[in-house]
Structure formats: structure tokens, C-alpha cells
Image (cartoon, rainbow, N blue to C red):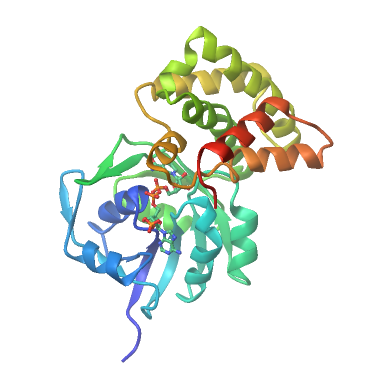
């Protein structure tokens, strides 16, 4: 019997993977690849995603299936394993929508397969009751992933291919290096970071990160960079950043793919970023890491 073939597969049946899969599945078949057979079996029995009881075509790590396109939605530290799983699906391409800078590792682990990293401001969180989508966002994909953008749009997501995807990734990284570690360290929702005593640190983080990211291809001037960070903190004021949720749950954080990636860029430019370095060290003390 030949392996089942899907137009789309999602690797990572967590908050965002299930949010995307449940909506995409309203338009066509989607394979959802879970970390274990037990997790796949639980998912097949049904999981609440927003108002939908979703019964995914969920598969464990050894299932033999094919997929034309793969979306990676595991946490950054699981990127290499997800890339290896992607290769077994023999797709046309693999695209990550993770936070942090995971494209180099994804590409290295995908071998000859076309692989790239997009960004998304879709949001979702999970608890014992299921998955809770937390508001619509926008998804930008690297050139070459037009078919994925079309599938997302058909399912009602705001999605498009972004020719300047590297600059867009750096703008997202800027927001993440400023908000995530601070929110996680002080255990406050994003909006609190605009209060005077936190804001001085937020400003320092942007001031240190901006020259490094600008030299790497960020397309924002310094004032716009700061305004972007404030705007996201304001717009997501009641949200608890994913790094904060990870710290509270005792899960590994994505500090290496976020602040660690910035520190690596700075090192390559011969620069030291003392405030980011301090937060990096503190978050790694606070929580397990990959
Ligand atoms: N949630 C959001 O609102 C949001 C928004 C924008 C971007 N992102 C980014 O999207 C990515 C996913 O975030 P998330 O919140 O969805 O994380 P999550 O809820 O932790 O989901 C990740 C899922 O991937 C599974 N996984 C790990 N390794 C795997 C493997 N080798 N094969 C198959 N499944 C595997 C995990 O299984 P276990 O549970 O067994 O570990 C978990 O179910 C992160 O990079 C995050 O920063 C998230």
C-alpha cells in the first residue's frame, strides 16, 4: 500500500500548530505530526481548538506519509528533529513559522530540500481544555512558498509571500529580544513593560539591539524600531509572553534562538551587548534550556 499523501503537513501539534491545522483542515486534508504515537492517538480522539472540536489526521514519529509542503511549528530547540522528520515526507519545501532565528539550523538539517523561515503574528495558547486562538495576525512567507501562502489565505488567514523576508524576520526578532526576556524575568504581562521602571530597561534593550540588527539588514530606523516595540507591547498588553509561559510551566525557553541569536550577530560584528547578555544569563538560570 502506498503512503498517504497530503498537500500540507504541520510538524508540532502544540498551540500554534493546532491553530493553523484546524483552520487549514476546513479547506483540505492536513497531516499533523506529533512527537509521539500516544500524543497522536489522543489528538485523533478530538481536541477543542477555539469553538471547533477538531479531530486531526494526526501521526506519530514513525508513520510513513508524504506531504507536498511542510510547516514547522515546534519550539526552536526542536528544529533539527522536526527538519529530519520533514525530510521523511519528501516534500517540495519546508517552511518554519517559529520565533527566533531558526533558518540556518533548519536549512542545515533539511539537506537538499528548499527550506526557509517566515514569521507570523497569529497567536494561540493551550491549557487543559484545549487550544485558545488569541487573535488574528499576519503570516509572511519566504519567496518560493507561494503555494503555502495560497493555502493559508484560502483557509481565512492573512498571508502572503514577503520578498524582504530577512528584514521582516529581524523586525520580529527586535520585538522578541526586547519583550520576551523582560516579561519572563519580571513575570509581568507585555503591557506592564511600558511602565516607567520597566521601560528604561526596554529602551536599553532596543538601543543595544538596533545597531546590530540594522547592520544585519533591519529596515527600520532607531525611532521606528522603538515605536514598533512599544506598539506591540501596547497591542498585546494583556498577553503573557511565550517565554513567560515557558518559565512558569518549567518548560525550556527559546532564549537561545531569540537573545542568543542576537548575541551571535553582535559577536560577529565585534560588539558586546551587556544588557542582553545579562538577561540571557538570567533566563538560562531561571528555566531549563534545550
Ligand atoms: N503560540 C503562539 O502564539 C506563537 C506565536 C508566534 C510564534 N510562535 C512560535 O511558534 C513555535 C511553536 O509555538 P507553540 O506555542 O505552538 O509551542 P508549543 O505549544 O510548545 O507546541 C510545540 C509542539 O511541538 C511538539 N514537538 C516538539 N518536537 C517535535 C518533533 N520532533 N516532532 C513533532 N512534534 C514535536 C511539542 O510536543 P511536546 O508537547 O511533547 O513538547 C509541542 O506539542 C515557537 O517557535 C513559537 O515561538 C508561537
Please give the name of the residue rendered at 61% of the width and 23% of the height, measured from the top-left corner. 225
Say left or right for 34 vs 171. left
In the rendering, at what x and y percent does residue 189 appear? 40, 24
> Which one is in front, 139 or 130?
130
Identity of the residue furthest to the top in this view: 196
In the rendering, at what x and y percent does residue 203 appear? 61, 16
Please give the name of the residue rendered at 63% of the width and 72% of the height, measured from the top-left corner. 112
Q: Quadrant of the N terminus?
A: bottom left
In the rendering, at what x and y percent does residue 158 appear? 37, 41
Identity of the residue furthest to the front in this view: 285
Looking at the rendering, which quadrant does residue 206 occupy?
A: top right
> Which one is in front, 267 or 280?
280
Q: Is residue 219 visible?
A: no
In the rendering, at what x and y percent does residue 204 appear? 65, 18
Identity of the residue furthest to the bottom in this view: 1
Say left or right for 263 vs 252. right
Q: Where 13 sits versus 228, above or below?
A: below
Looking at the rendering, which quadrant does residue 3 occupy?
A: bottom left
Identity of the residue furthest to the right in this view: 270
Please give the name of the residue rendered at 29% of the width and 44% of the height, measured from the top-left corner. 126
Looking at the rendering, which quadrant does residue 234 occupy?
A: top left
Say left or right for 271 vs 179. right
Q: How many marks?
A: 0
Q: Is residue 228 visible?
A: yes
Q: Where 191 sits versus 152, above or below?
A: above
> Which one is in front, 139 or 37?
37
Say left or right for 115 vs 234. right
Amino acid at each position: 500500500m502506498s503512503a498517504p499523501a497530503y498537500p500540507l503537513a504541520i510538524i508540532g501539534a502544540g498551540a500554534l500548530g493546532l491553530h493553523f491545522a484546524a483552520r487549514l483542515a476546513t479547506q483540505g486534508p492536513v497531516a499533523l505530526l506529533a512527537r509521539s504515537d500516544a500524543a497522536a492517538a489522543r489528538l485523533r480522539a478530538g481536541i477543542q481548538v477555539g469553538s471547533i472540536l477538531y479531530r486531526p489526521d494526526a501521526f506519530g514519529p514513525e508513520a510513513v506519509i508524504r506531504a507536498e509542503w511542510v510547516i514547522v511549528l515546534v519550539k526552536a530547540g526542536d528544529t533539527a528533529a522536526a527538519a529530519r522528520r520533514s525530510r521523511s515526507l519528501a516534500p517540495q519545501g519546508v517552511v518554519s513559522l517559529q520565533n527566533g532565528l531558526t533558518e540556518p539550523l533548519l536549512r542545515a538539517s533539511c539537506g537538499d530540500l528548499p527550506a526557509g523561515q517566515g514569521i507570523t503574528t497569529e497567536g494561540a495558547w493551550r491549557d487543559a481544555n484545549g487550544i485558545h486562538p488569541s487573535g488574528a495576525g499576519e503570516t509572511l512567507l519566504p519567496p518560493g512558498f507561494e503555494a503555502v501562502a495560497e493555502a493559508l489565505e484560502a483557509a481565512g488567514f492573512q498571508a502572503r509571500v514577503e520578498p524582504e523576508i530577512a528584514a521582516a524576520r529581524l523586525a520580529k526578532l527586535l520585538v522578541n529580544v526586547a519583550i520576551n526576556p523582560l516579561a519572563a524575568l519580571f513575570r509581568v504581562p507585555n503591557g506592564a513593560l511600558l511602565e516607567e521602571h520597566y521601560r528604561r530597561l526596554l529602551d536599553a534593550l532596543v538601543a543595544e539591539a538596533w545597531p546590530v540588527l540594522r547592520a544585519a539588514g533591519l529596515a527600520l530606523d532607531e525611532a521606528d524600531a522603538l515605536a514598533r516595540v512599544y506598539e506591540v507591547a501596547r497591542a498585546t498588553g494583556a498577553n503573557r509572553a511565550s517565554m513567560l509561559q515557558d518559565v512558569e510551566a518549567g518548560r525550556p525557553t527559546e532564549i537561545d534562538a531569540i537573545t542568543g541569536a542576537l548575541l551571535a550577530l553582535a559577536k560577529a560584528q565585534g560588539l558586546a551587548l551587556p544588557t542582553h547578555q545579562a538577561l540571557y544569563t538570567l533566563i538560562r538560570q531561571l528555566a531549563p534550556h534545550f
